[in-house]
Image: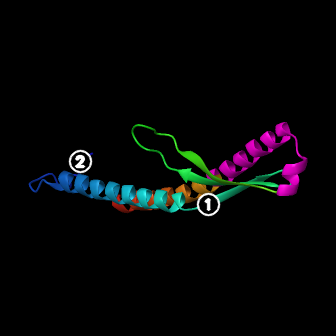
Amino acid sequence: FGGKKEGGGGGGGGGMMDQLAMFKKAQEVAKKKNELDKELQAVDTIGSAADGNVKVTVKYVPPQLPANPNPGYDVVSVDIDESYLGEVSAEDLSAALVDAIRDGETQSTVMVAEKYQELQSDMTEMLQGMQK
């Protein structure tokens, strides 16, 4: 931390300005992350199993820091084909539901990772801009 001291004498204050700039950049990143989390929460991801006969809609739940630092997923709806429901065993239906939920969570995780990769690129650009 602290500023670069150029030319040895007088002035001062450069370190404080660098820290203030870093703080402002950190605030920008936090704001972008919050906006991204809200955007991701609004997206429905549909997982499916049993040849599309079981579909589950999943929503991303961002981490709730510091109490719960891990993201999660909520199942918001389940759609089971009626003809499939009439012929499937309870065990197979249960397995298909689990598979559909996992599929939805996997798709949501991929989407979140892609969006966070974009945020990381923005952060890298901001940090590089500060070093110039």
Majority SS type along the magenta span: helix
Q: Quadrant of residue 123?
A: bottom left
Q: Is residue 86 on the magenta stretch?
A: yes
Q: Residue at x 23, y 47 (%)?
A: 2
The residue that disc 1 covers is 44
SS for tag 1?
Answer: strand
The residue that disc 2 covers is 2
Magenta segment = 82-109
The percent coordinates of residue 30 (x first, y second) are 38, 55
Residue closer to the observer: 100 or 6: 100
| Left/right of residue 39 with respect to residue 22 in the rendered view | right
Residue at the extreme right: 87
The percent coordinates of residue 21 (x first, y second) are 27, 58
| Left/right of residue 45 with respect to residue 21 in the rendered view | right
| Left/right of residue 78 with respect to residue 127 in the rendered view | right
Q: Residues within 10 Å of mark 1 (few under 14, many from 20)?
A: some
Q: Residue at x 47, y 59 (%)?
A: 38
Q: Residues within 10 Å of mark 2 (few under 14, many from 20)?
A: few
Amino acid under disc 2 = Gly
The answer to the question of whether label 1 and label 2 lie on touching residues, with beta carbons closer than 8 A, is no
SS for tag 2?
Answer: loop
**Quadrant of the frame with the N terminus:** top left
Q: Residue at x 34, y 54 (%)?
A: 26
Q: Quadrant of residue 48?
A: bottom right
Amino acid under disc 1 = Asp
Vertical order, 92 against 106 (above or below): above
